[in-house]
Amino acid sequence: MNFSVPNPSNRTAPGAIAILVSALLGGMAGGVAWCFLSLWLPWFALFWIVPIAIVLAVSARWQGYREGAAIACTLLAVLIAFAYAQYLFGAVRIADSMGLPLREALFKAGFSLTADIAWANLRAPDWIALALAMVGGVAVARLRSPSRQTSDDS
């Protein structure tokens, strides 16, 4: 019986659908995490996206994505996390101003009103945080694995 560990360099590159699904799930989880962290520690609320982007990049690498696939997955996940968190922040603003529970505000306000409020509340620091998150995420996604050998190492 052969119980050898498969060589990761022989794996085929992940397909676009796998990258999209990973980015969607990671991005939505990152957006929710950003909202929870912002409620728990509001003094750093704007820039929670940066450590979340790093976690998303590490997650992409952990899933086996390398080079361009890891970068694409990370960037897409960070954009999804940013958009989803801003949408949730908009829903929190609606709930707060109307005195409603968040769940009720999400269903009563509708997508377009919540998205409009989220968009209207974006400022330059939000875009700076997004840019920092994307740069940090790409930097981590580009890191080479220490166990990875090149043809020069042999």
Image: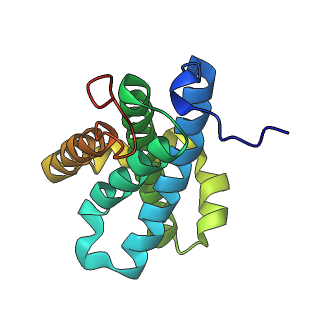
State the residue in front, 86 or 48.
Answer: 48
Q: Residue furthest bottom?
A: 40
- Tell me: residue 78, above or below residue 154: below
State the residue in front, 90 or 109.
Answer: 90
Question: Residue 86 location in percent, x, y?
Answer: 40, 51
- Tell me: residue 47, above or below residue 134: below
Question: Residue 83 location in percent, x, y?
Answer: 42, 43
Regarding residue 115, the answer to whether it shows in the image is no
Q: Residue sitting at 23 percent across and 47 percent down? A: 136
Q: Residue sitting at 41 percent across and 33 percent down? A: 70
Looking at the rendered structure, the number of numbered marks drawn on it comes to: 0
- Specify the quadrant of the image occupied by residue 44: bottom left
Q: Residue furthest right?
A: 1
Regarding residue 137, the answer to whether it shows in the image is yes
State the residue in front, 46 or 75.
Answer: 75
Q: Quadrant of the C terminus?
A: top left
Question: Residue 19 location in percent, x, y?
Answer: 55, 28
**Is residue 65 found left or right of 48 in the rendered image?**
right
Question: Residue 113 location in percent, x, y?
Answer: 49, 44
Q: Residue sitting at 57 percent across and 37 percent down? A: 22
Q: How is the image coloured?
A: rainbow
**Is residue 32 found left or right of 107 in the rendered image?**
left
Q: Quadrant of the N terminus?
A: top right
Q: Residue sitting at 48 percent across and 33 percent down? A: 65
